Amino acid sequence: MTENGEAVSITQLTNHLLNLTMNYTNGWHVLYVKSRWEKRVYESLLEIDVESFLPQFKTIKQWSDRKKTVIQPLFPSYVFTYLRSLKEFNKVLTINGVCCYVRFGNRYARVTEEEIEKMKFLVRDERISVTVSEKKRPKVGETKMITSGVLNNFECEVLKINNQNKVIVRIDSLKQNFIATVPADYLCEAAVEF
């Protein structure tokens, strides 16, 4: 059945699945796995002799009573796997914890050997500090309050997000608009008016 409740024939379903597998090529693919199952899936892949990569980094977690150094995935719920055959492609999907291959449209997400090597270098080099931003990025159109700098306590609308650190905002005051670029960490939720 389709989303509209229409019946799907076996032929249509077979053609759809055949089309997906026809887009398969050897190389690095991206697996989407259950939350917090990355390491188990990675180890299972190694057990069946499938080349895999799970980029991880050390971080310090702060609880109310203690700090602890933990190792966590650089990309939560993602494991990279190098596939050499369609048989291997299908075998990987049978591993407990694997949800699916990441796709964009009807194409499987692929990662180049060069990108994998760069990620390996990144997580291996002790001199490089890896930080994953856990702060939710603002979205275009949201109303925020600026909490630092010369624009402290101004309410603004997010117009554009340049990168992790810079946000272009519009500030309405005195019936005049001006646009400012501010660091994303200067923004917080605007007060709700009743």
Image (cartoon, rainbow, N blue to C red):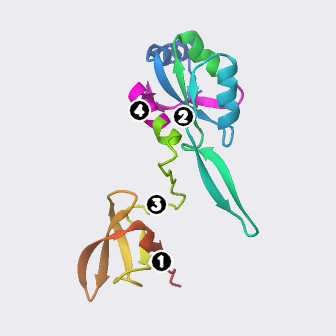
Q: Magenta stretch? A: 95-120
Pointers 4 and 1 in contact (C-beta within 8 Å)? no
Circle 4 packing at 10 Å, graded few (<14), some (14-19), many (20+), is: few
The disc label shown at residue 190, or none: 1
Q: Residue at x 37, y 81 (%)?
A: 149
Q: Amino acid at mark 3?
A: Arg
Nearest to the eye among marks 4 and 3: give it. Answer: 4
Circle 2 packing at 10 Å, graded few (<14), some (14-19), many (20+), is: few
Query: Does residue 75 appear to the left or right of 161 in the view shown?
Result: right
Q: Earlier in the sequence, mark 1 or mark 2?
A: 2
Total marks shown come to: 4
Q: Indicate the position of residue 168 as horizontal and vertical percent values.
A: 31, 67
Q: Earlier in the sequence, mark 3 or mark 1?
A: 3
Q: Where's the N terminus, which quadrant?
A: top right
Nearest to the eye among marks 3 and 1: give it. Answer: 3
The residue identified by callout 4 is 115
Q: Amino acid at mark 4?
A: Glu
Q: Earlier in the sequence, mark 4 or mark 3?
A: 4
